[in-house]
DNA sequence: TGTTGGATCGGT
DNA sequence: CCGATCCAACAT
């Protein structure tokens, strides 16, 4: 199965631009890896060093976030909470370090494979409902770090078969971030059962 | 070299 | 609500 080059080129152009339109445009796009394809239903935009305290690139370039400073269309994969992987699509021009976190998706191909990686799941809608669950369903880990997503590699991002219309996109504060609660940079396809549950960030007091 | 807490999840 | 479980980032 292949997609028209013109669609991929259009997506590349979108990702090379400002992060908020890129985030909105990623809704409905398809991400394939490890024998599973998801239709993206929820994302979050992160600005680079440009005053976004929630961004992993906020304090400048480090080995972990280095790929964010490169060209758009590459995967920024990070490990968190000692056990989970999450994936972002790098956006904007080189040096800007903006990215879009893929928070949730609907599994549209490879449901059985996804289920084999997510054995605790009951409903199909929960297979990729949450950023770490999405990576688990697709088998994405550190080996996907820095990969270009619009080529013929093992992790592929493709344009939406049916783009999510602007009127069907809801927005709200980002999940799990310590500050910037007033910035509505979480976007989701309204009414989708695959969208992750909103949890306000609660700092831990003890360990 | 040591300390701290995180763009989470699943079970209770 | 809590515990799991690693490691990046920063302080010393």
Image (cartoon, coloured by chain):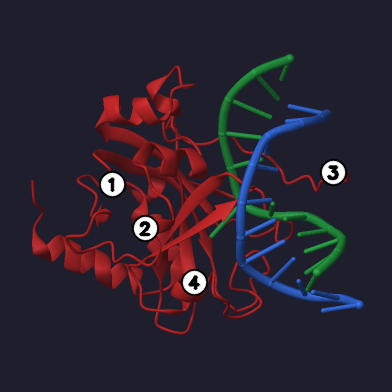
Chain colours: A red, B green, C blue
Would you say the residues marked 1 and 4 are in contact, meaning their CB atoms lie under 8 Å apart?
Answer: no
According to the picture, the residue beneath numbered tag 2 turns out to be A144
Which chain does tag 3 point to? Answer: A
Up-down relation of residue A95 to residue A165 (above or below): below
Instruction: Give the left or right position of residue A201, taking residue A169 as reference.
Output: right
**How many badges with numbers are in the image?**
4
Q: Earlier in the sequence, mark 1 or mark 4?
A: 1
| Residue A83 placement (x, y as % from top left) | 58, 44
Per the model, the C-alpha gap separating discs 1 and 4 is 23 Å
Q: Quadrant of the C terminus of chain A?
A: top right
Label 4 element class? strand
Per the model, the C-alpha gap separating discs 1 and 3 is 36 Å
Up-down relation of residue A74 to residue A32 (above or below): below
Label 1 element class? strand
Which chain does tag 2 point to? Answer: A
Q: Which mark is residue A33?
A: 1
Name the front one of labels 2 and 4: 2
Label 3 element class? loop
Up-down relation of residue A78 to residue A13 (above or below): above
Q: Earlier in the sequence, mark 3 or mark 2?
A: 2
Are the residues under marks 1 and 4 on the same chain?
yes
Q: Earlier in the sequence, mark 4 or mark 3?
A: 4
Q: Residue at x 19, y 64 (%)?
A: A151
Which chain does tag 1 point to? Answer: A
Up-down relation of residue A110 to residue A75 (above or below): above
Per the model, the C-alpha gap separating discs 2 and 4 is 18 Å
Would you say the residues marked 1 and 2 are in contact, meaning their CB atoms lie under 8 Å apart?
Answer: yes
Q: Tell me, yes or no, if residue A14 can be seen here.
A: yes
Name the front one of labels 4 and 3: 3
According to the picture, the residue beneath numbered tag 3 turns out to be A207
According to the picture, the residue beneath numbered tag 4 turns out to be A98
């Amino acid at each position: 199965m292949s997609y028209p080059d013109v669609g991929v080129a259009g997506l590349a152009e979108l990702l090379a631009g400002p992060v908020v339109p890129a985030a909105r445009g990623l809704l409905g796009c398809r991400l394939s890896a490890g024998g599973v394809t998801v239709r993206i239903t929820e994302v979050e935009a992160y600005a680079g060093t440009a005053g976004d305290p929630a961004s992993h690139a906020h304090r400048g370039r480090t080995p972990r976030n280095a790929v964010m400073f490169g060209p758009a269309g590459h995967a920024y994969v990070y490990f968190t909470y000692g056990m989970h992987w999450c994936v972002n699509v790098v956006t904007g021009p080189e040096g800007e370090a903006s990215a879009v976190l893929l928070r949730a998706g609907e599994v549209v191909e490879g449901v059985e494979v996804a289920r084999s990686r997510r054995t605790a799941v009951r409903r199909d809608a929960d297979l990729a409902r949450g950023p770490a669950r999405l990576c688990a369903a697709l088998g994405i880990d550190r080996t996907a770090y820095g990969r270009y997503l619009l080529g013929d590699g093992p992790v592929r991002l493709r344009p939406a078969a049916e783009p999510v219309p602007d009127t069907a996109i809801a927005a709200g504060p980002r999940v799990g971030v310590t500050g910037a609660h007033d910035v509505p940079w979480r976007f989701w396809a309204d009414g989708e059962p695959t969208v992750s549950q909103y949890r306000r960030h609660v700092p831990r007091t003890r360990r």
